[in-house]
Image: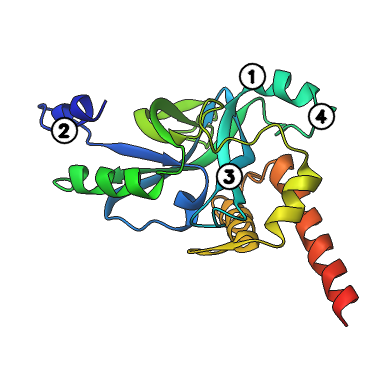
Amino acid sequence: MRQEIEAKVNEEGSEGVWVFGYGSLIWKVDFPVEERRVGYIKGFERRFWQKSHDHRGTPEKPGYVVTLVENEQLAELEKSIGGQSKSGDDGKCYGVVYRIKKGLEKEVLDHLDHREKDGYTVHKVCVYSDEPRDGSEEEHVVVKEALVYIGQAENSSFAGPVTNEEVARVIANTIGLSGTNQEYLFNLCEALRGLTPSHMLVDDHLLELEGLVHKFIMLEYCISV
């Protein structure tokens, strides 16, 4: 896929290379960009089901970070744990799509491949928006073709299905090279809340985890004093 992507960059009329972020890429953009747009992809939901053995955990005590799970697969996986909260937004997953600075596409993609090395692979998605445009509130395409990094169920770091309570207990007590696991969750929720004033973009899965992690942190504090 990389050869195909890099070849398209040099085509006449190319819109460049776009990358869709739904996790830490929303609030930690460590590469040069030409443009950013808020939007969503369809057919997927965000889940804290990808183990992190480096950034937010260790090989001995991995943390959890987000990946995307297709709606149909998610329904099957969650049957085994009694079902969990859905996004409530018809399978939309909100995030930010970035156009990589022209001329730096190869370097940035090399960097992202390394950053997302713990089980993620690159896929193509279409990014949409339902923000009003030209007087219309109808859904429209923001970026026709963007790259997204997904930790699919076949990768060795995929841990799903996992109950929210189990995930929250790990998040509350895990740290990696990039910081605490709870910081990752809280930063993601805060970033989603700040994307647009007209929508509630924090899905139910994140809201429940946020509440559970705060509860476990408070319980540990009460036990320690």
In the image, 161 versus 135, the foreground residue is 161
In the image, 99 versus 130, the foreground residue is 99
Say which residue label 4 marks: 81
Say which residue label 2 marks: 9
* Total marks placed: 4
Query: Badge 4: few (under 14), some or many (20 or more) residues near its Cα, within 10 Å?
Result: few
Q: Earlier in the sequence, mark 1 or mark 3?
A: 3
Foreground disc of the pair 1, 3: 3
Residue 52 percent across, percent down from the top left: 54, 49
Query: Which quarter shows the C terminus?
Result: bottom right
Q: CA distance from mark 2 to mark 1?
A: 33 Å
Q: Is residue 145 left or right of residue 172?
A: left
Q: CA distance from mark 1 to mark 4?
A: 14 Å
The amino acid beneath tag 3 is Lys
Whether label 1 touches label 4, CB < 8 Å: no
Q: Earlier in the sequence, mark 2 or mark 1?
A: 2
Whether label 4 touches label 3, CB < 8 Å: no
Q: Earlier in the sequence, mark 4 or mark 3?
A: 3
Q: CA distance from mark 1 to mark 3?
A: 19 Å
Q: CA distance from mark 3 to mark 2?
A: 33 Å
The amino acid beneath tag 2 is Val
Q: Earlier in the sequence, mark 1 or mark 4?
A: 1
Residue at the farthest front position? 60
* Mark 2 residue element: helix
Foreground disc of the pair 3, 2: 3
Q: Earlier in the sequence, mark 3 or mark 2?
A: 2
Q: CA distance from mark 4 to mark 3?
A: 18 Å
What label sits on residue 73 in the rendered view? 1
Residue at x 81% of width, y 28% of height: 83
Whether label 4 touches label 2, CB < 8 Å: no
Say which residue label 3 marks: 51
